[in-house]
Amino acid sequence: NSNNNNNNNNQGFTTNLTNSLRLSQNRNEESLFDDINDMDLNEEEFEGEEEENEEEGEGGLSKINDVFRNQQNNNNNEEKKDENEVRRYDLRHGELPEGIEIIGEGVEFEEQKDGSTCLNVPAGSILKLDIEGLKANGGSLINDWSITLDLKFDRLPKEALSLFQTLSNGERQTEGEAYIYNNGGVGVFGELGVKDSWIKEKRWTRVVLTMGGRGFESDGYYRRLTSYVNSKKCASVDRGVFKRPDGRFALNTKSLLLFSSIKENLLSDVKVKYIEVRRSCMSEEIVKEQAYENRIYSFWEINKKKKAEEMYKGLSLQPLYKKPPPIWYHPAFLAEFGDAFLEGTGLEGGNVYSGLAFFELVLNRALEEQRIFLNGFGHTDFQVLDFASEMFT
């Protein structure tokens, strides 16, 4: 009876392991690590699949080793692609996001009715944005661009507020490259835009400014700075200065100054909760499509994100992956505890890279947290172990 029970247990382990691996194969179009929230697997999910597994045989299962081997290169491909095109700075969570430097005094977070926060920026204080990584276009600077700002004024500026300085000439500052005027108009060179789209006091407003056109040809040239207020076109400005590539209205590829001017009468108190900089000129249609993107603050979404982050922190493989899988998905774990059952799964060969990374993690944690269990080791032993751990690191 004992032998029969052991055989049944082994067969059950083999079946569940095989089916677990097949389940991973069926999901191979998505990152394995995105399935962490779906880990409450049970036998019902595997019913009727055992015979199918046996027919597929060797090579029929997902090459999970390949997933782990390529994970560090592919895990953030979409994010990296996005980082080359856009920079986002969300100020609604009570923390200053990476890439913003405050210049001046009196800048502080202010809690809103919905529980989110905004940054209260007094007149004379500046937000310096790190936009390094956004590639130049149309020249050596960013000539086509879009800037999105979610703003609020308790009182509109006495004269005007300089929205930003491009720093196209390095750190040399100007009066500003676009303004919000005292009547709520948004533009430049005195162009206020149409009245029905002007900014109102005590209301959160999404302001979008775009620069772009069809090249830099001198004839048949059409290149404009356009402003939008809550997705409505406000001002459309056409000037000869826009024709010059890498001129005053091109963005520096390293940094951008918000609410900065060399003239005090172009400074004003303002509140801001979201900032976005793109290296492309958004069309009017795209501006309208994105009118409410990133504008809704949801406690549910924030709590969900925090819970996911806490879950990731609690997983053993967190130091190795941004979104770590449960440890029993890792090839090194399978090699240690399931070696006798891996034949025919495609996992027999293992993977050197993921295996060494796993081993380095376990070794270092053992040396740091479980050194007490190595009481029999002498100084020479520890010297060898510490050298090995440093070599892996």
Image: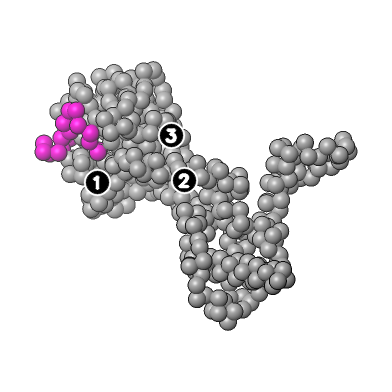
Q: Position of residue 176 (x, y in %)?
A: 30, 29
Dot 3 amino acid type = Pro
The answer to the question of whether label 3 and label 2 lie on touching residues, with beta carbons closer than 8 A, is no
Q: Is residue 7 above or below residue 259?
A: below
Instruction: Calculate the distance from the C-alpha at mark 3 to the C-alpha at mark 2.
Output: 19 Å
User: Which residue shows up at 20% across the image and 34% down it?
Assistant: 186
Q: How far apart are the two marked residues, 2 and 1, measured between alpha carbons?
A: 28 Å
Q: Which residues are magenta?
A: 190-207
Q: Circle 3 — which element?
A: loop
Which of marks 3 and 1 precedes in the sequence? 3
Tell me: 275 left or right of 59.
left
Looking at the image, tell me whether mark 3 or mark 2 is earlier in sequence order.
3
The dominant secondary structure in magenta is loop
Q: Is residue 330 visible?
A: yes
The kind of residue tagged 1 is Ala
Assess disc 2: are there few (<14), some (14-19) or many (≥20) residues with their C-alpha within 10 Å of its C-alpha.
some
Q: Residue 246: horizontal and vertical position, in percent?
A: 38, 41
Q: Nearer the viewer, residue 53 or 104?
A: 53
Q: Which mark is residue 291?
A: 1
Q: Residues within 10 Å of mark 3 (few under 14, many from 20)?
A: few
Q: Position of residue 13 (x, y in %)?
A: 63, 66
Q: Quadrant of the C terminus?
A: top right
- Residue furthest to the left: 196
Sequence-wise, the earlier of marks 2 and 1 is 1
Task: Tally the numbered discs.
Answer: 3
- Residue 196 falls within the magenta-colored stretch: yes
Which residue is under mark 3? 97
